[in-house]
Image: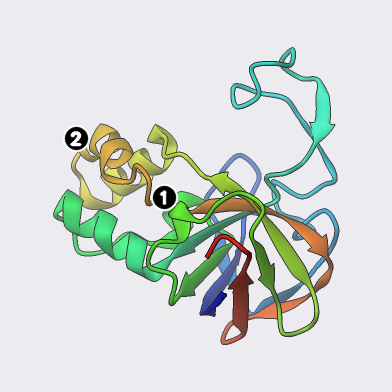
Amino acid sequence: MSIIAKVEAVLIADEPGTFVTREIDGVELQFGGIEGDRHFGLFAKANVRQPMYKRGTEIMNRRQLSIVSVEELQGIAQRLGVETIRPEWLGANLLISGAPELTKLPMGIRMMLPSGGGLVCEGENEPCTGPGKMIADHYGDRSLTQRFVKAAWKSRGIVAYVERPGELKKGDLVEIHNSFL
């Protein structure tokens, strides 16, 4: 069984010192993700998300891409009582539509690209206060920083890594499939 989702935006975090992304026309995904993006690379340094390793230990980068859905962002905005939540504010690399429960997809699902490339889901991208602060700054309401974490729980999107390189651009249809759907 599969879901067909549409790529609404491709984004990159290539400004030093910030996780905020900006929209680009498309990208040639590599084994390390999006070249120039802050999460690009085959390896990463362990941090608070990998407490079993000493901080700074080199590990495999399974968090190359952050993917969010239009439907889940609309739900977060509604729960916060704001007009919109932009994928850039969350540091997202892909915005898709047609996957209203994207965050609930299990680890290991594959997203197949029309170019033949493929991504593997590594699970939920848990909400934190960084994006909450961006939202709070945009709306001029400091309470949104902490409220975002609760409002985005189980609907913040997923992280993934590139299993097979390929081109990805706005308007592409991706097939999300696995035996769990």
Locate the N terminus and report the quarter of the image it occupies: bottom right
**Rendered image: mark on residue 143:** 2
Percent position of residue 56, x then y: 76, 19
Q: Residues within 10 Å of mark 1 (few under 14, many from 20)?
A: many
Residue at the image point whose x is 67% and y is 45% from the top: 63
Q: Residue at x 18, y 52 (%)?
A: 79
Q: Which residue is mark 1?
A: 156
Task: Identify the image quadrant of residue 33.
Answer: bottom right
Residue 38 screen position, x and y as percent: 69, 47
Residue 112 picture location, percent across and down: 70, 74
x and y percentages locating residue 18 in the rendered image: 56, 43
Residue 12 falls left or right of residue 69: right
The residue nearer to you, when weighing 29 against 181, is 181
Q: Amino acid at mark 1?
A: Arg
State the SS at label 1: loop
Whether label 1 touches label 2, CB < 8 Å: no
Tell me what residue is drawn at x 81 percent, y 20 percent: 57
Give the tally of numbered discs.
Answer: 2
**Residue found farthest to the top:** 54
| Quadrant position of residue 145 | top left
Callout 2 environment at 10 Å: few (<14), some (14 to 19), or many (20+)? few
Q: Earlier in the sequence, mark 1 or mark 2?
A: 2
Give the secondary structure at mark 2: loop
- Mark 1 to mark 2: distance in Å? 18 Å
Q: How is the image coloured?
A: rainbow
Mark number, residue 65: none
Q: Residue at x 40, y 61 (%)?
A: 101
